[in-house]
């Protein structure tokens, strides 16, 4: 056996100091990271084995830096994008490296390197791929799927204005797919009878999203029909589903999925086929929403909200700021300036100033009203008027 350094101590150091990178991670500079790589020495000889182990060690170093930039939830939900943008080309993020030690045991070769990872370049690649960074939360999603089973004329849907519980296989399967991908789900409740049709247009879908504090609304329809033949024993059913996802902040469509399957289904009304097709569509839609949402978040607008009428009515201003922070698409609300009768807030917003102004005017405050004084590309001016 060949040993050029106390490898066991180095491995112990790696295990005990996994969080070191997170504590010292620069905003956009460089990070020195340790990595260990392993390979089997085969007929190609030691040189080929050493090269393979060295590449594995550099990959590990980049991955360690990556874990300080991307949350575990984003890693799980967006691994395909991460694999394509970073892990498939780790050499682009390593400025230099040095071998600290290596060792062989039988035909197994291991090497430990210290690599300099360019964090800024890593972040830019992630942004370009639409991968979210840090601990930014997934958007809350409201699911609205009207379902029609085989042999039934009318669809079932939760927003039809009735209080009884109705079974909707597609809604359940789609909700599970989104929840498994990390998206929190808004909890729907009874709405006014006849307020919304079974096929929701953009305006109705966004209105429901705002009512239930969602940031994204997934709306669509699923249906099943008997085919008369089956690929396996039992009745055959053709199930189809068409879905789209709208961003509540500005009604923009951010994802689209359509699926169709034909399968044996002994249920008698196609419910198993509906569940299967909804699950497939939900998994595809979840990936699209995640990638589009966080790519847009990386390029979100920074706006100013000038609030007049705060003098002597600070409680009203606090309520206004709280409501503003809770609006879909709004993030990181900060107080920039506070004067006797005026305050200036800054915030990040996934949408236009006009769509934010409309969302503010749609709010209902008990102790005051809000008048819109001006809407500009990078600013909004409002006045708080006591009731």
Image: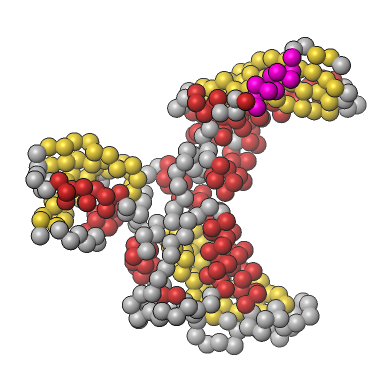
Name the residue located 13 percent from the left edge and 51 percent from the top edge: 383
Image position of 174 with respect to 155: above or below: above
Q: Position of residue 65 (x, y in %)?
A: 57, 29
In the displayed structure, 116 sits above or below 238; it is above
Going by the image, does 337 lie left or right of 231?
A: left
Q: Is residue 184 visible?
A: yes
Name, please, the residue furthest toward the right: 43
Residue at 56% across / 33% down in the picture?
66
Whether residue 250 is in magenta: the answer is: no
Viewport quadrant of the N terminus = top right
Q: Give left or right: position of 199 versus 262.
A: left
Choose top left, top right, bottom left or bottom right for residue 240.
bottom right
Quarter holding residue 51: top right
The answer, for residue 199, to whether it is visible in the render is no
Residue pictured at 54% horizontal, 22% vertical: 31
> Percent from the top left, x then y, of residue 61?
63, 27
Of 383 and 4, nearer the camera is 4
Left or right of 106 in this view: 78: left
The quarter of the image holding the C terminus is bottom left
Q: Is residue 348 above or below residue 50?
A: below
Q: Position of residue 53 (x, y in %)?
A: 75, 25
- Most extreme residue toward the top is 4
What kind of secondary structure does the magenta stretch mostly adopt? helix
Q: Is residue 13 magenta?
A: yes
Q: Is residue 147 left or right of residue 376?
A: right
> Which of the pair 26/351 is nearer the observer?
26
Boundaries of the magenta span? 6-15
């Amino acid at each position: 056996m060949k040993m050029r350094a106390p490898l066991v101590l180095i491995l112990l150091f790696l295990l005990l100091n996994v969080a070191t990178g997170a504590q010292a991670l620069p905003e956009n500079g460089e990070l020195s990271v340790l990595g260990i790589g392993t390979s089997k020495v085969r007929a190609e000889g030691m040189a080929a084995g050493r090269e393979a182990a060295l590449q594995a060690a550099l990959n590990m170093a980049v991955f360690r830096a990556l874990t300080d930039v991307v949350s575990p939830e984003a890693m799980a939900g967006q691994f395909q994008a991460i694999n394509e943008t970073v892990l498939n080309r780790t050499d682009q993020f390593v400025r230099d490296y040095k071998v600290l030690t290596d060792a062989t045991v039988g035909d197994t070769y291991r090497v430990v390197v210290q690599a300099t990872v360019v964090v800024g370049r890593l972040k830019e690649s992630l942004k370009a791929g639409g991968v979210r960074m840090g601990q930014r939360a997934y958007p809350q999603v409201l699911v609205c799927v009207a379902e029609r089973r085989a042999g039934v004329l009318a669809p079932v849907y939760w927003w039809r204005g009735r209080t009884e519980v109705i079974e909707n296989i597609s809604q359940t399967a789609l909700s599970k797919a989104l929840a498994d991908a990390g998206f929190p789900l808004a909890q729907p409740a009874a709405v006014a009878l006849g307020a919304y049709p079974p096929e929701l247009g953009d305006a109705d879908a966004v209105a429901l999203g705002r009512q239930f504090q969602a940031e994204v609304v997934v709306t669509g329809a699923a249906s099943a029909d008997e085919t008369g033949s089956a690929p396996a024993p039992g009745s055959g059913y053709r199930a189809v589903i068409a879905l789209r996802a709208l961003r509540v902040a500005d009604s923009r469509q951010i994802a689209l999925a359509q699926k169709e399957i034909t399968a044996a289904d002994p249920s008698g009304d196609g419910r198993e086929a509906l569940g299967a097709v909804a699950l497939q569509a939900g998994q595809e839609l979840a990936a699209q929403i995640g990638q589009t949402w966080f790519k847009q978040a990386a390029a979100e607008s920074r706006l100013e909200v000038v609030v007049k009428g705060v003098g002597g009515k600070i409680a009203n201003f606090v309520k206004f700021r709280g409501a503003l922070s809770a609006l879909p698409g709004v993030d990181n609300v900060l107080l920039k300036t506070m004067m006797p009768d005026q305050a200036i807030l800054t915030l990040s917003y996934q949408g236009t100033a006009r769509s934010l102004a409309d969302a503010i005017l749609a709010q209902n405050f008990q102790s005051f009203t809000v008048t819109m004084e001006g809407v500009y590309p990078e600013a909004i001016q409002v006045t708080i008027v006591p009731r």
